[in-house]
Each structure stands twice: as structure tokens, then as C-alpha cells.
Amino acid sequence: MTWGMIGQERAVAALTGALAGGRVAHAYVFVGPERVGKHTLALKLAQALNCEKDERPCGECKACRRIAGGIHADVQTVVVEEAEDDEGMRKGIHVSQIREIERATALKPFEGLTRVVIIDPAEEMNAAAQNAFLKTLEEPPPQVVFVLVAVDESRLLPTIRSRCRRLELRLLSLADVEAALLERGVESERARLLARLSRGRVGWALEMAADASLLERREESLAQARSLGSMGVAERLALAERLAGGFRRDPEGLLAELGAWRGWWRDVLLVRSGSEDGVANIDRLPELREDATRLRRDGVAAFVRALGDAGRQLRENAQPRLVLETLLLGAPAAEAPAGQPVGR
């Protein structure tokens, strides 16, 4: 089969075996870190289930091409409806979306062999949506396969998880990510940097390689991360307000920003501990060394943890401004001039 996946051989082998043996489950949950290929694999499974050739998925027949183009009548993706309530809180996947899925899957496939419903990210189904979806799983319609794509499967009801076949996708080695970039013509030094920055998320690395503006945005993010140490309280609160407004317009953009900040401060910790070989921002070692000499290790470590907590809280619909104010007020402050080391 021509799955065309980078890595994830175990997950592909499991699906290949299920297809060959006629043991395809009525529901799967694809679990793993962000940008490792979960949604891509879900589409490949949809192609394999509807492919018109003997060797499935061929990637070339009408069905495969229509699925890849997002226009196949029997393959549907349910996503978060970005909206705001009076406090600017993010919404999730609603029960009305699940009801629409119920209506669609009650019908026979329209142009293919199997209806495939991809719910991504599945953990964003709210409580009512999860309960409604559970009823569908308890009596699954024929000729339908559900694929739940999740980073945090613990947010799914145990009764939903128990009715899905679980496939775990993992981070790739940096060598594999770098090799994939080189195969696509990325210059060697840039491929090495992107592989480091990706931390094994091959989808992220490929997107960054294809869009030069994303690396420019990274430069802005790192500059902002470095400026936090010199900000006063008023400046931090003003920044929190601006970021909260940006989160309402582009939640994923802000989460990516916080991810870049976390990567920077993690690298600062690595430099302080003498572990420069593990640094992701390898093109910024002089600046990392500078920050490592003027910021206390315990303050940086606490901020790295806080950044992770803030990202989780924002994904779980916490009030953005409160989360960001708390985060920024706890950002490490510079306690020594550049080049003059501080204590712990």
C-alpha cells in the first residue's frame, strides 16, 4: 500500500493488517502529540476504505484524489467552531455538529464504499456532544468508520475510549525529520535547524519549510520572549491584554506563540545546565548564553512549567486575560547585567 506516511510504521502496519483481514474497526482514536501526522493518517485510512484500485490507497484514483482535495461526499471532518461568548471564551465541538453527523451517517454512502467521519480534535467535544456521540458508538451505523483525532485522550469519556480501537502516533527522531526535509530539497543547515525546532513533529517541520514567513514569525516570537525579563508590571499587564485580544481572533496563533516562548526558555535552562547539545534554537546560542547568565535558573524553570499550564488552560476554555496576566506576572525578571552571572 502506498500510504506515503513519514514514520509511524507501527500505526500504518496495524491499519494495513486490519484492511487485509477485513477487521477494520467501526471507530478509532488516533492519539499523539500535535503535528505528527494523525489527521493525515485519518485521511489515508479514508482513501484506503474507498479506493478504486487493488492496492489501497493508490492516491491516484478518483476517490483518492477527491478525498485528498476535501470534496468527497462520504468523508467528513468535524472541527471546532471558533466563536466567542460574552467573555470571549473559545467554543468546542457542539452537540448540534454531532446531530448533523448522526443524520448523515444514517444514510448509505453516496459515492464511495464507506462513510468516514473524522473528529479533530476530538477532545474539544463538549459534554453534551460527547454524550450524544456515545449513543452513536453504542449502535454504530453500517458502512461508517469514525476516526477521533486527539492529543489529550484523557478528556474523552472513558466509555467513548473503550469503544474505539486506539492507535498511538509518536514523535519522530530528529534524524528522521531532517532526512524527510532533505528529501524534499530543503538546504542542509535549514533542515537541521527545523528538525531541532520541530522536536519530532514532522508536520510542523514540513509546514515551516514550505512557508518562509513562519520562520520570520518565529523571530518575532523569540524577540518577545527575550523582552519579558526587562518588562515592568504595567508593561506585562498591557501585553497580557493585547495577547488576550489576539487569542479571541486567532487562538492557534497565540498557542503557537506560547509554544515558541516555552521552547526558548527550555533552551535557556539547557544552556545553564551545560547541555547545549539538546538546544533546539541552535542558531541563537549567543543570545541563549546571554539570557542564561542573567536570569535565575529556578525562575526560568518555573516559567517553563507555567507556560505549559497556560496552554492547557487556554485549550480548556479558561478566561484568556486572567490566564495571560497570571502567566506574564510570573515571567522571570533579569537580575544581572548582560554577561554578569547570577546565582541559582
Image: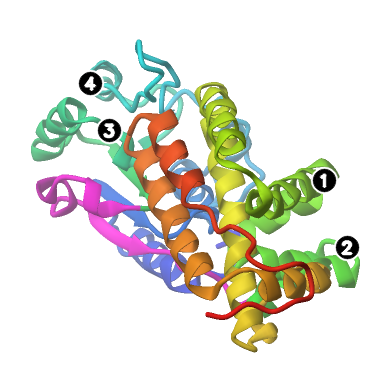
Q: Position of residue 193 (x, y in %)?
A: 78, 68
**Does residue 5 appear in the picture of this structure?**
no
Q: Position of residue 252 (x, y in %)?
A: 54, 36
Disc number placed over residue 125 in the picture, else none = 3
Disc number placed over residue 185 in the picture, else none = 2
Amino acid type at mark 3: Met
Say which of 325 and 90 sits in front. Answer: 325
Q: Quadrant of residue 180?
A: bottom right
Secondary structure beneath disc 2? Answer: loop
Q: Residues within 10 Å of mark 4 (few under 14, many from 20)?
A: some
Question: Residue at horizontal 59%, vertical 57%?
Answer: 333
Say which of 12 and 298 sits in front. Answer: 298
| Part of the protein shown in magenta | 152-173
Give the labeled residue for mark 4: 95
Q: Position of residue 164 (x, y in %)?
A: 21, 52
Say which of 115 and 146 sits in front. Answer: 146
Amino acid type at mark 4: Val
